[in-house]
Image (cartoon, rainbow, N blue to C red):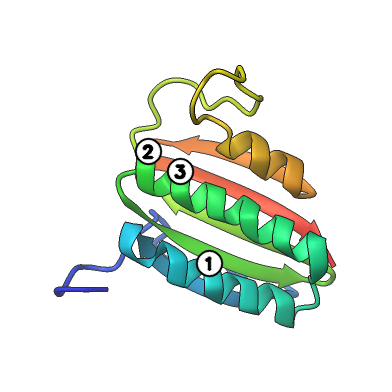
Amino acid sequence: MRDGAAPFDPGHPTPRVVTGVVPLLSQDFTEATVSTLRHALHAQVTAEGLTGDAGYDFVLAVHELVTNAVRHGGGHGRLELRRQNDVLTCEVIDRGSALGSLPVRLPAADRAGGRGLWLAHQLTEGLIVTRRLNGVTAIVTACL
């Protein structure tokens, strides 16, 4: 946080507790902190054993979701990385208006942008995108 800004509140009054889930990284982000967050995510994913192409793909997928949150979700958001047994789950939460569709398909080759959700879907074991009253939550998973 900078300049006394209030922490990002994704709308959860209390942290969720799920048996067997280990929190690994929990961080608010803005455009100014995207690179730092990507490096922290890469270090944590590697420490958990997701290395090589699979680790790179997961980090790239999450980076696309974070970038979408900054561009389309109000300029900031929150990242939550967790491990449950041999599965990594990363949740990216924003407060965007979520107007219009959230396509998870490859756009035409001559169209600039619009590939973030498609990439996240292709590069991970699964993608769930949920539209809420106060934003969007995107969740990706990877098996270790």
Depth-wise, is mark 1 or mark 2 nearer the camera? 1
User: Residue at (65%, 69%) from the top-left corner?
Assistant: 82
* Mark earlier in primary sequence (1, 3): 1
Which quadrant of the structure image shows residue 35? bottom left
State the separation of the CA atoms marked 1 and 3. 14 Å
Figure check: 112 above or below 121: above
Label 3, on which residue?
68
Q: Secondary structure at mark 3?
A: helix
Q: Quadrant of the C terminus?
A: bottom right
Relative to 22, is 40 on the left or the right?
left
Q: Secondary structure at mark 2?
A: helix
User: Residue at (83%, 72%) from the top-left corner?
Assistant: 85
Between 8 and 114, the residue placed more toward the observer is: 114
Figure check: 89 above or below 49: above
Amino acid carrying label 2: it is His
User: Residue at (54%, 65%) from the top-left corner?
Assistant: 80
